Image (tube, rainbow, N blue to C red):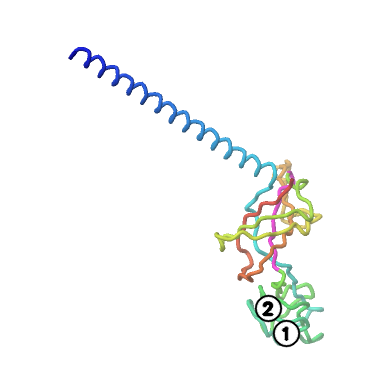
Amino acid sequence: MEKSKEITSKEITSKDKSSKKKISKKILYSILIVAVVLACSIGYYFYSIRVNYFTTDNAKVTAKMYPITPVTAGKILEWNVSAGDLVKKDEVLGRQEILPYITSPIDGTVVKSDVIKNQAVGATSQLAVVADTSNMYIGVNVEETDIMKIKVGQEVKVDIDAYPSKTFKGKVTEIDNTTQTYFSTSASSLTTSGTYTKVTQLIPVKVSIENKENLPMTLGMNAVVKIKVK
């Protein structure tokens, strides 16, 4: 009887071990299946993002800029504004000798002021820059190798570094007809030996954004844009 009990106990122990092994295998298989599905899902997500969106961090908050120049050469007798001042359209910014009044072409913000009282200026001198800060947008620089993916009207997701928890909706509204350096006299692809080096050009793209909460924006803030290309 004792031997029979020992045999029965061994059989039960053996069955328990076998059962535990089966359960362990099932758990392991389940974990492997979940891991494979998760990896596939993550892979598909990044593949979908790469195929359906064009993403770049070469983007900043900006606005249309209006350079202020005198009509003719002459001395500046009076200058009334400095960087950061809000101005109205046709507001007098300064006065000079011959054609006295220098005015603002728009409602906006003076973002640069390069003139002082009694300074002599030429007809093409830049006295100041006024930005149309009521219509700020995202200026995106797209490499020429990617520009054919971009079309006016495409939807855009914009993440601004200053607001890490918020994503802004946007839309491509304009694509420049020239590269960023086309009119630059200092940009050159020729070396001192006369050899030519090809440089990938950047094309400016304008993206308007929805800012329903009127969150404060500062010119030059960094942004990341995802343009839906498909």
First reached walking from the N terminus: tag 2 or tag 1: 1
Left or right of residue 45: residue 195: right
Q: Is residue 32 magenta?
A: no
User: Which percent across, then down, holds residue 108?
Assistant: 71, 76
Q: Nearer the viewer, residue 8 or 141?
A: 8
Residue occupying the point 66% across, 67% down: 211
Callout 2 secondary element? loop
Tag 1: amino acid: Gly
Callout 1 secondary element? strand
Residue occupying the point 70% across, 75% down: 128
Tag 2: amino acid: Val
Where residue 145 sits, quadrant-wise, is top right
Residue occupying the point 31% across, 19% down: 14
Give the main secondary structure, helix, strand or loop, of the magenta stretch.
strand
Residue placed under numbered mark 2 in the picture? 115
Sort mark 1 into few (<14), some (14-19) or many (20+) by Cα contacts within 10 Å.
many
* Numbered label attached to residue 94: 1
User: Which percent across, then down, holds residue 169?
Assistant: 68, 59
Residue occupying the point 78% across, 72% down: 124
* Magenta extent: 136-145
